[in-house]
Image (cartoon, rainbow, N blue to C red):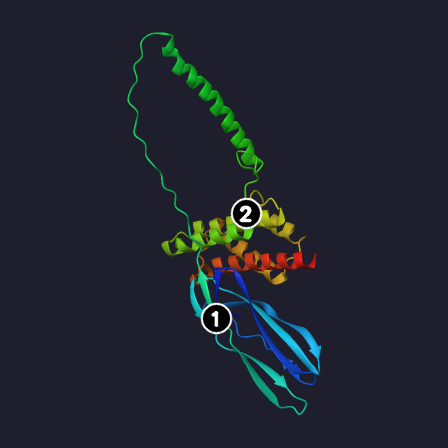
Amino acid sequence: MDVKDTLLIGDHKVLSFKTKVAKDVKYIFPTPSNPVTQGVEIIGQPVIDTLSAKNGELELETRITVTSFDSGSYTIPPIPAYLQKLDGSIDTVWYDAGKLQVTTIQIDTTSFKPYDVKGQQNYPYTVKEFLPWAGLVVLAVLLGLLIKKYIKSRREKRSLFGKPVLQDPPHIIALRSLENILSRKLWQNNQEKQFYTEIVDTLRLYLEGRYNIPTMEKTTGEILTSLSEHKIEPKEYENLKDLFILSDFVKFAKYKPTKEDNEKAVPAAVRFVNATYLQEIEEEKGR
């Protein structure tokens, strides 16, 4: 990989390693420990592909996908692979994984420009005196039509002049929301109920955008039943189920979650979003 790669917090990066081995040598790439370093985690299992086979030699490519939930600069330690020869001896190959620079989502701020209040205007009692009022009536009618068109364009997800509104994909919206929840330190300030409500609402909106499931008016059981019809990895499905059930306990049963529960909640939601987004990419490649 490059000397330093940059990625958005919660996004994923594929680390790729190439090597050449003789055909009679067994190539072994064990799954690295997770996390590979403090702050960097592995998503899924390593993938090994054969790029070429000629002159009694194989060219192999090994790929692992990593992600990070904390911003900063990380140096990934060397990753080993093993070459087992016919006589049973084993050689070790070390791969330099390089560095990762993880950045956060920048939140835009909006500035407002104040305008002075216009002074009162006095006109003679003539026909011209009514012209401004007539203009206001016309302006009000035009403004009403403009508001009506704006509301209609918003419902149809188009701009005011008919062009489609470019929206961020569901996983980016969800990751941005989860980052915001994490930064506000709700549970640290005894706001566990608000903390879990916002996490689950973020996941509900993500599921609507990702799977076209109307979730905001459904119970946890109804949502999980609808999700069971989609091809979601069992592990990710169970993790989401546990998070939804924990949230219900906190909101409706006045359950007091542990510090470990609170610390794992946002990372669990981020992992679910990333895993299903990665699955979506793989499905598109398959199609």
Residue 250 in view, yes or no: no
- Residue at point 45%, 65% (across, down): 101
C-alpha distance separating marks 1 and 2: 37 Å
Left or right: 136 with respect to 18?
A: left
The C terminus, quarter of image? bottom right
Dot label at residue 205? 2
In the displayed image of the protein, which residue is found farthest to the front? 55
* Residue at (71% x, 79% y) in the render: 54
- Rendering coords of residue 212 (x, y %): 62, 46
- Residue visible at 55% across and 59% down in the picture: 274
Work out whether 262 lies above or below 202.
Answer: below
Report which quarter residue 245 is drawn in.
bottom right
**In the displayed image of the protein, which residue is found farthest to the bottom?**
87
Residue bearing mark 1: 3
Query: Which numbered dot is residue 246?
Result: none
Tell me which corner region of the image, top left, top right, bottom left or bottom right, holds residue 38.
Answer: bottom left
